[in-house]
Amino acid sequence: MSKLLIQGGKTLSGTVRISGAKNSAVAIIAACILFRGETILENVPKISDVQILLHIMEQLGAKIHWLNEESVSIEVPDQIEYSARYEEVRSLRASNLLLGSLLGRCGKAEVALPGGCDLGPRPMDLHIKGFSKLGATVETKNDYIQAKADHLTGAFIYLDFPSVGATENIMMAAAMAEGLTTIENVAKEPEIVDLANLLNSAGAKVRGAGTDIIKIEGVPELRTPHHTIIPDRIEAGTFLAAAAMTGSNLKLENVISAHLNPVIAKMRESGVIVRPNGSDIYVKGPNELKAVNVKTLAHPGFPTDMQPQIMSMLTIANGTSTIVENLFEERMKAAPELCKMGADITINGNIATVHGVKKLHGASVMAKDLRAGAALVIAALAAEGETEINGLTVIDRGYYQMEEKLAQLGATVRRVD
């Protein structure tokens, strides 16, 4: 098993380029099933989640070719398989997004129940409800979700919760459905807008992405688009937290600062200097961080994917911080590992109370999920001594060349396979 060895206590400096958004890339790659022919995607993060999904696409019949380190060609034939194999699908949460695109393209889909990080219950009921409203018959059999429809018809769909995955799946299934589909109480994340932009560039008629209501007028056919994926706001937020914890000056390139507004607001409240400038962000960590209170919410609230990193940052803030996790039951897995490094964190249900300490110290810790792993990395950068972070597989799911980027900023970090 791979691990990172990080010698902490060093100030970072320099420029880091933020990769394409993981959560956008997986939805957009899945959507390429809807397009007959070659789609070119730019700013694609070459992370393991993307590599696994592209491998699944190849098994379905697509031809995949990396044009360079950040650009990929996806060529989908006229005939494509509709069943995604169990082995690969079970390791990737985003594989559930194949349901909407396969149903929209083939009129049937068979995908194993998804895997990914264990963050507590993430049911598929809203996805299934949406497909059913569009006229599909959906059933779960032998750990597979099977959906089929003679033809899909536009419908009114209300989501009980603004689920990102359900919103994306329904958008893809409805893109070529007959008539108008209206989805209310949808997710409003930037990744939803990115998917809508991709679909519209292919000839779809999607309106309202980024608001509470999305309307989709089905079209009979879609053409192949050329699309650039948005920058990863969570990777950018992680580097903001790293600068804050280490008192560093950094420049982040390839960022859409508006996507980070709730994170930037909390950073500034904690004493961090953050200055957006076009597609760059300049950040300077303070001599002493201030305690702040954080509540995770659906966008445009504070993102749950940044909760472990802000928890890590607040372990050395002056005072007591409270973090309320409103989205995922198992999102606090970073806390016990941070406590091994000297943090003072108490968990009560979905509430974490973080009493700031003067300093953290190196320890042997385990990355329990993707964002918890990122939280441990930035804690290790600020800690005294060496930290050994095990379980890098989960970090590789969402961060491309993390150790190389940190080393370029002056961190003493080494990967041991």
Image (cartoon, rainbow, N blue to C red):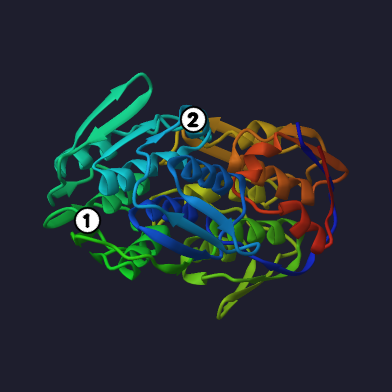
Nearest to viewer (mark 1 / mark 2): 1
At which x and y percent is residue 263? 52, 60
Question: Residue placed at 34% from the left, 58% from the top?
Answer: 188
Q: Where, by quadrant of the figure, is residue 218 drawn?
A: bottom left
| Residue 176 numbered mark, or none | 1
Please state the total of marks drawn on the protein image. 2
- Res. 300 in view: no
Decide which of 120, 352 is in the foreground and name it.
120
Q: Secondary structure at mark 1?
A: loop
Question: Residue placed at 30% from the left, 50% from the top?
Answer: 167
At which x and y percent is residue 34? 33, 54
Q: Secondary structure at mark 2?
A: loop
| Residue farthest to the top, as pictured | 142
Residue type at mark 2 is Arg
Decide which of 18, 314 is in the foreground and name it.
18
At which x and y percent is residue 373? 66, 41
Q: In the rendered image, which residue does mark 2 sit on?
A: 90
Residue type at mark 1 is Met
Q: Where, by quadrant of the figure, is residue 368 drawn?
A: top right
Horizontal arrangement in the rendering, residue 104 relative to residue 233 (left or right) = left
- Res. 37 in view: yes
In the rendered view of the protein, which quadrant contains the N terminus?
Answer: top right
Relative to 356, say whether 87 is above or below. above
